[in-house]
Image (tube, rainbow, N blue to C red):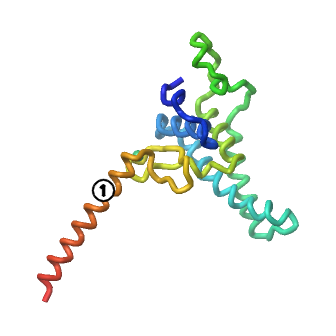
Amino acid sequence: MPKSLSRMSRNYAGEFEGYRVVTWLNRNKGGAKAKCVLRVLDLLPKYRRAVAPWIAKGISGVTGPEMALLEKLGRALWAELGRWPVYLCLDADSIEWAKMPKFTYARADSAGVALLNMIRLFEQGLIHRVRRCLKCKKWFYARFRHQQFCSTRCQQSHYRSSEEWKAYRREWMRQYRRLTP
Ligand SMILES: [Zn+2]
């Protein structure tokens, strides 16, 4: 188990699943599997929003266009998920297996595990917390609703650079006004 995972607090909902999803996304860039996982990641929050009227109003309250959207997204999602074979196994990472150093198990396809954890997040209403850092573009799991950066370092560096940018703009405008009659 990576050290960062064993040190991680599990107090935040979905963080365990989120960690596994973002680790996979950061390690697997490009390639057919990564593209499929990214398509599912794009579809899941849309599907969640599309299913909201059904949950709120019941099936009889869903309008024609709402149902059409739901069906369209559902078809796209099942087509993506249908590519993956399913087999049943215990998720060894949910056992504290760091304490069992000799314990090994047959690994499921890592993309399949990432998808499984994405579905777990979807079911908890937390799939939109899998995000890309605004600064470094790395995938991260947002512990908080409005979190946009993977780390305090990226956040500070982003605001510092935008402060520098604003200062530069101010100076430029000042010069420009001086030159313009
Ligand atoms: Zn970052």
Residue at the spot 44% in from the left edge and 50% down from the top edge: 149
Q: Residue furthest bottom?
A: 181
Q: Is 129 left, or right, of 178 in this rendering? A: right
The amino acid type, in three-letter code, at marker 1 is Arg
Query: Where's residue 165, x and y in %?
Result: 27, 63
Q: Is 178 left, or right, of 9 in this rendering? A: left
Taking depth in this image into account, of 116 and 130 the one nearest to the observer is 130
Residue at the spot 62% in from the left edge and 47% down from the top edge: 40
- Residue 177 sits in quarter: bottom left
Query: Where's residue 147, x and y in %?
Result: 50, 53
Position of residue 18 relative to residue 46, above or below, is above
Q: Residue furthest top?
A: 102
Q: Secondary structure at mark 1?
A: helix
Residue at the spot 84% in from the left edge and 69% down from the top edge: 61
Position of residue 66 relative to residue 30, above or below, is below
Residue at the spot 65% in from the left edge and 51% down from the top edge: 44
> Quarter holding the N terminus?
top right
Taking depth in this image into account, of 100 and 90 the one nearest to the observer is 100
- Label 1, on which residue? 160
Query: Where's residue 77, x and y in %?
Result: 69, 49
Graded by Cα atoms within 10 Å as few (under 14), some (14 to 19) or many (20 or more), the crowding at tag 1 reads few
> Quarter holding the C terminus?
bottom left
Query: Where's residue 161, x and y in %?
Result: 29, 57
- Residue 95 sits in quarter: top right
